[in-house]
Image (spheres, grey):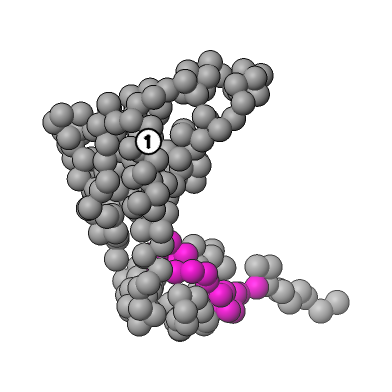
Amino acid sequence: MNATVKDVMTTEVVVVRRGATFKEMAAALRRFRVSALPVVDADGKVIGVVSGADMLVKEVPLGVIDGLVHHKEVHKAAGLTAGDLMTHPAVTVRPGDSVEHAARLMYNLRIKRLPVVDAGGGLVGVISRTDLLAVYDRPDSEIRDEVEGLIRHEFLPSQIAVSVEDGVVTVAGSPETTALGHHIVGKVRHVQGVVAVRDQLSYPDVYPIVAGPVL
């Protein structure tokens, strides 16, 4: 299984135009219980994103803003519309991007939602942190089948047994070499839906004892 953004994204997206007022956006965030709103132009192309954090700038006293953050945040505090408050250009992903890529962007940039756009920049969906966690709904039996297939096709003739419970994969057996065992465990960790890997492999001695001549 190689899940992509299109497999887990939400296609019903609440959007606003550049001229949307502060009150309209606040109402939309509350009503639809989302953390951010993509801002689109007349052609449906994403031109920015307004998050709850962008809007909360108004709740911070202006003197505190002047002393702690950049000039653009002071400008946002005086903003009245989506065009004033939005972060632009928006960080986006494509439908065919991997869920790992989307997760990495969210983690590194500390954002909760990403607009999903087509080749022309048009909005086709949105993906959230919760959507990314959908890969962990994968049945244990399906994970086990993929892991066993991976080992069988890439690491034959290793004698490895696989079991899966609640997304936790246990691998046991005797790989031909220590390097091969570590490689198997590393590969299994990257199978989608795997929560963790329990390494119960019996590794060969790294430094085998060699009998010397009897003196």
The x, y position of residue 188, in whole percent, is 44, 67
The x, y position of residue 117, in whole percent, is 23, 40
SS assignment at label 1: helix
Of residues 154 and 30, the one nearer the viewer is 30
Residue marked by disc 1: 23
Please identify the residue farthest to the right as the structure is shown: 215
Q: Can residue 46 be seen in this view?
A: no
Of residues 29 and 180, the one nearer the viewer is 29
User: Which residues fall within the magenta stretch?
Assistant: 188-205
147 is higher (above) or lower (below) than 10: below
Determine which quarter of the picture holds residue 164. Answer: bottom left
Quarter that holds the N terminus: bottom left
Determine which quarter of the picture holds residue 49. Answer: top left
The x, y position of residue 182, in whole percent, is 53, 65
Please identify the residue farthest to the left as the structure is shown: 43
Q: Which residue is drawn at 25% across and 59% down?
A: 7
86 is higher (above) or lower (below) than 166: above
Of residues 102 and 202, the one nearer the viewer is 102
